[in-house]
Image: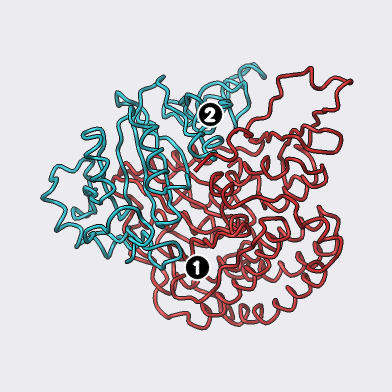
Amino acid sequence: MSSPTNDRSNLDLETPDKTYLDSNELIINMGPQHPATHGVLRVILKLDGEKVLGTECVIGYLHRGVEKIAENRTYTMFNPYVDRMDYVAAVSNGLGYCEAVEKLLNVEAPPRAKYIRVILTELNRIASHQLWLGTHALDIGAMTPLFYTFRDREEILKIFEKYCGARLTTHAFRIGGCQYETYAGFEKDVKNFLAFFPPKIDEYEALLTTNRIWLERTKKVGVISRADCIALGVTGPVLRASGVKWDLRKAQPYEAYSDFDFEIPTGENGDTYDRYMVRMIEMRQSLRIIEQAVNGIPEGPIMGKVPKVVKPPVGEIYHSIEAPKGELGYFIVSDGSTQPYRVRVRPPSFVNLQALDVMVRGLLVADVVAVIGTLDIVLGEVDR
Amino acid sequence: MAEEVKSPAPPPPPQPQPAQTGPSGGPEGEQKPAAEKPAAAAPAVPAKPAAPAKPAAPAKPAGPVPMPWTSPLVEKYKSQYGSGLDAQTYLGQNYLNVDRSLIPDILRLLRDEEQFDYCVDITAVHYPKREKQFDVVWILYSFPRNQRVRVKTQIADGASIPSSVSIWPTANWLEREVYDMFGITFDGHPDLKRILLPDGWKGFPLRKDYGILQQDKEWVQINLGIESGQ
């Protein structure tokens, strides 16, 4: 297997003679405060007229040293911090962390807790995809979907708020299970949402799927091949849109995902439109999972046998889950004390963003905006 | 279990842990360490009783212990590289402790021959009291085998390690982050510079001797001329 993207990974900014006025090449700066960069991402673009010759991402503006913080907190204290990485999918972040520590402790959450976790995580996946869709469409020029998605996302956030008191950085799960039992009417709320949401997806699709402007702006834009995806470690909907049928929920099921019946959508062309379609289908599949989970939710305890003081034995663990953006992994090293010796977060956004350069070469500046949107990055997670 | 379907290696002997899994999409995975624990203890112990890094396990003495990991893959490389390579499994996850000198070769072989085509993550761990202060860890995944493996090596402070950007392009940013946080240099990296921290940053924050207040105190001292209240 060759290295398809290696020779292009680096933008040569050290040759100023190319950027003088007699040349066509121009280096311009986009961000860090740019409405289309979804946070504080700075992209240096090397242009020939309107055509992109290369990019370099400058990241780190939101770096908060999460991994260093972890080393100075106990396992339990660090739990809320992970919500602040991918703040639009905080539940997934918490799930990955709690599961990793549980594996290190060699305990398992009880079945009821697992089902609650699955319901909330899938709701969060929908919320994350809604936010992606709204902002992505806004970047491309369609303003209406933003209002639609934010309106409907509110229904999910209401469930979160009723469940744990927080809408976004939920801290919904604890090591060993869940802290809170479901509130009275939780199942009803979730079922109401299951009935409420499918027509809304149809609404989004009516606005976009066959919209001529949307097709022009997304078809054959930001194409990434299957081989490039794998070489660059790209995961999540981006990988699936390039034709790789790989989802950690199926490939290495965690939590209770092996109990549920759902499909993994894939695309063929690996372009922005395929990624859009993959995420739209994923929302419907998430509804399927939620429906099965809420109908089959078992009775029982919600907290496993976890000591009050979490003190895993010496050892290390890597555990990853399928977050809305891709593979979210935690590599935790324990030295036997109450504080983790090292926590490494493998963020999907950070790794996926690396593919930006490959995806935008040869496109127009306006397409860079579309590709940043389609990668679905959250800078809080890129920078940690 | 149908590992042999796409794997070039012959089917493995019955494994104590369920980490050897079927082709991509199969329902199995590297989970349920609790279930395998009693089974794992029986066959593997006599082969190598002195398993290192035995957990202290203050409350429960019967905690899981790293076991020698045996598989055709390991046998093959062990016969090739001998003592430079040590294979272990802990909580159902396999890892290879590899001598630093073998690093580019082993990684390349794992990709080319064993189909570990996806480099999930590269990271490091700092052990300041050890002579070779750093563990560098590669977390690899194989799509055809649906299997993970970790490769670890130890290097001393100031020593460099060959870059794996030519093996997996994704290593580019991952190695830059390791350099940024630990100060480990990767030979042959196309553009090794800080990635998350500003270029002028002093020190490497994820080293254990880097205090979390150090930067703050210094900034307050220089810019405000007073002692930091932190």
Alpha carbons under labels 2 and 1: distance apart: 35 Å
For numbered disc 1, what is the local secondary structure?
Answer: helix
- Give the quarter of the image for residue A161: bottom right
Instruction: Decide if residue B176 is on the left or right side of residue A129.
Output: left
Instruction: Decide if residue B112 is on the left or right side of residue A235.
Output: left
Q: How is the image coloured?
A: by chain
Residue position for label 1: A117
Crowd tier of the residue under label 2, counting other residues whose Cα lies within 10 Å: few below 14, some 14–19, many 20 or above: many
For image coordinates 14% across by 58% down, the residue present is B42
Image position, residue A249 (x, y; %): 49, 64
Q: Which one is in front in this view, the residue at disc 2 or the one at disc 1?
A: 2
Q: Mark 2: which amino acid? A: Asp
Chain A: give its colour: red
Image position, residue B125 (x, y; %): 40, 35
* Nearer to me, A107 or B194: B194
- In the rendered image, is residue B105 in sight? yes
* Nearer to me, B35 or B81: B81
Check the image and report above or below for B66 versus A293: above
* Nearer to me, A145 or A277: A277
For numbered disc 2, what is the local secondary structure?
Answer: helix
Q: Which mark is residue B108?
A: none
Residue position for label 2: B180
Instruction: Decide if residue B35 is on the left or right side of residue A24.
Output: left
Image position, residue A127 (x, y; %): 66, 64
- Give the quarter of the image for residue A19: top right
The chain carrying label 1 is: A
The chain carrying label 2 is: B
Crowd tier of the residue under label 1, counting other residues whose Cα lies within 10 Å: few below 14, some 14–19, many 20 or above: many
